[in-house]
Image: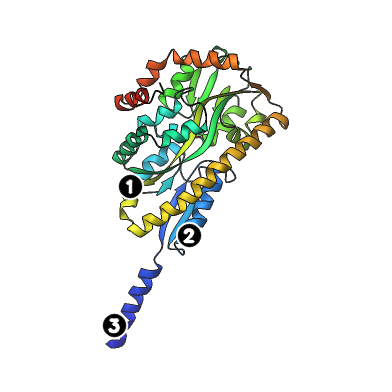
Amino acid sequence: MYKVISLILFILVYKFSYSETIIRFSHVVSVDSPKGIAVEKFKTELEKISSGRLKVLIYPEGTLFDDIPVIEALKKNIVQMAAPSFSKFSDKIRDFQVFDIPFLFNNIKDIHNFYNSKAISILNRETENFGLKILDFWDNDFKHITCSKRLIKKPEDLKGLKVRTMGSDILNAQFKIVGAMPYTYPFGSLKHILEEGLIDCQENTFNNIYSQKLYNSQKYLTVSSHGYLGYAVVISKKFWESLSGEEKKLIKEALKKTTAYERELAQRKNFTDFFRLTHKSNLVVHKLSEEEKVYWITFYKRHKNLFLNYLSSEMAKELQEMGLY
Ligand code: LMR
């Protein structure tokens, strides 16, 4: 009897001390992109500090879910973590589109300041109400326009062209306003639709343009920095609430280190990839002159109310109070 009780106690203690918690982390970009590398780092950090009790399984390059369906999968706790670009949330949490408003932010410092603003408390609340929790924000960079048909120097040059977008109403409006035709396609098919000539143009960061080899099907690159592509690192709320205080602390700790690393890496990679696109591809690269840039900014400012109408009145008011819009 004594032996049986000891054995049961041993099994229980063993199970308790060595039980693993699995975190499935899904993303769509290549493993050597800033986000791809960051997810690997997060895994290494977390598994190390939790002595393997928190285990991260990574599903890169859209192998499990594309970024829009992953949001529903997170809510249902089918996967536990992801870091979709802001635009991909807009279908469910429309205020994420704030990042899609053309020329709202001038530089990365503006973006980082925004992460500490009241606008983000609104976004945090809305995201929790939907069933996810924002843990952090990762960078990619500002977006630029590539096209196969012609060089884009002013917004009107996009007229009549088919443009791939990440899918938010604001992104689509940004192109409809100029008479272009926006189409939403998943990141995984971007390369192919451009190669097949189904779509003429797209907007993305230097790193995504380079890592997806979009320079093979696109002829022109306009360095416009007209919008920002960043990521919300989110976790399923259902999963988060099932974790102990200690587990939550470890996740936050691993993420803190990863975020600092990811942001630095994103800047470095985009810088290098811009150099490669300019010097090692056949793209015709045009950087908007100061005058051209003022023209673009003025053009889109005229449509300010249209963009604001896609946001909640609370977010629109906050932007105005912050003097951003
Ligand atoms: C895209 O769909 O172009 C991007 O959101 C991909 C990414 O995650 O950077």
Classify 10 Å Cα crowding around label 2: few (below 14), some (14-19), many (20 and above): some
Q: Going 65% across and 30% down the picture, which residue do you hit?
A: 215
* Residue at the disc numbered 1: 237
Earlier residue among tags 2 and 1? 2
Picture coordinates of residue 55, whole percent (x, y): 45, 58
Between 38 and 105, which is closer to the camera in this rendering?
A: 105
* Residue at the disc numbered 3: 5
Specify whether residue 211 is in view.
Answer: yes
| Left or right, residue 54 beside residue 44 | left
Between 195 and 164, which is closer to the camera in this rendering?
A: 164
Q: What amino acid type should be assigned to the residue bearing mark 2?
A: Glu
Whole-number angstrom distance, CA of label 3 to CA of label 1 = 38 Å
Picture coordinates of residue 222, whole percent (x, y): 61, 22
Foreground label between 2 and 3: 2
Specify whether residue 179 is in view.
Answer: no
Picture coordinates of residue 147, whole percent (x, y): 61, 22
Secondary structure beneath disc 1?
helix
Secondary structure beneath disc 2?
helix
Picture coordinates of residue 325, whole percent (x, y): 40, 21
| Marks 2 & 3, CB-CB < 8 Å contact | no
Q: Going 38% across and 49% down the picture, which residue do you hit?
A: 78
Earlier residue among tags 2 and 3? 3
Mark number, residue 47: 2
- Residue at mark 2: C-beta within 8 A of ligand 1: no
